[in-house]
Image (tube, grey):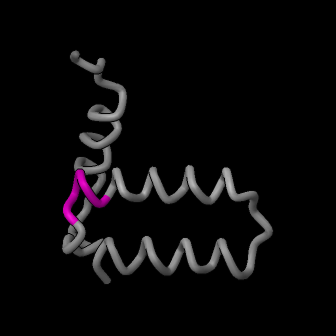
Amino acid sequence: MIISEACQKFLGHCRGAVSLSDHTLRAYTSDLRDVETYFGPRKRLKAIDKEGLRQYIRYLSAPIEY
């Protein structure tokens, strides 16, 4: 499965099966868009390893340059 499919399935589940606020759904959607942007929407989930996740976490914690 590719990232974009997994994100859509997760958000669909959150909208239908879980009672979440609109604010939480917007936050999840934004976070998952960031994941898609970083890894690429066509990246296969199985191709993301621990090191890839570590790099993403470092990317998230890097200071913002203006």
Relative to 10, is 47 on the left or the right?
left
| Residue 40: % across, % down | 19, 63
Q: Main secondary structure of the magenta part?
A: helix
**Closest to the observer, 51 or 33:** 33
Q: Quadrant of residue 41?
A: bottom left
Residue sitting at x 29%, y 32%: 58
| Residue 57: % across, % down | 35, 38
Residue sitting at x 50%, y 80%: 9
Q: Quadrant of the N terminus?
A: bottom left
**Closest to the observer, 19 or 66:** 66
Q: Is residue 15 above or below residue 25?
A: below
Magenta residues (range): 36-40
Q: Quadrant of the C terminus?
A: top left
| Residue 53: % across, % down | 31, 49
Q: Is residue 44 magenta?
A: no
| Residue 42: % across, % down | 19, 74
Residue sitting at x 74%, y 80%: 17
Relative to 29, is 35 on the left or the right?
left
How many marks the image carries: the answer is 0
Residue sitting at x 23%, y 51%: 38
Q: Quadrant of residue 44?
A: bottom left
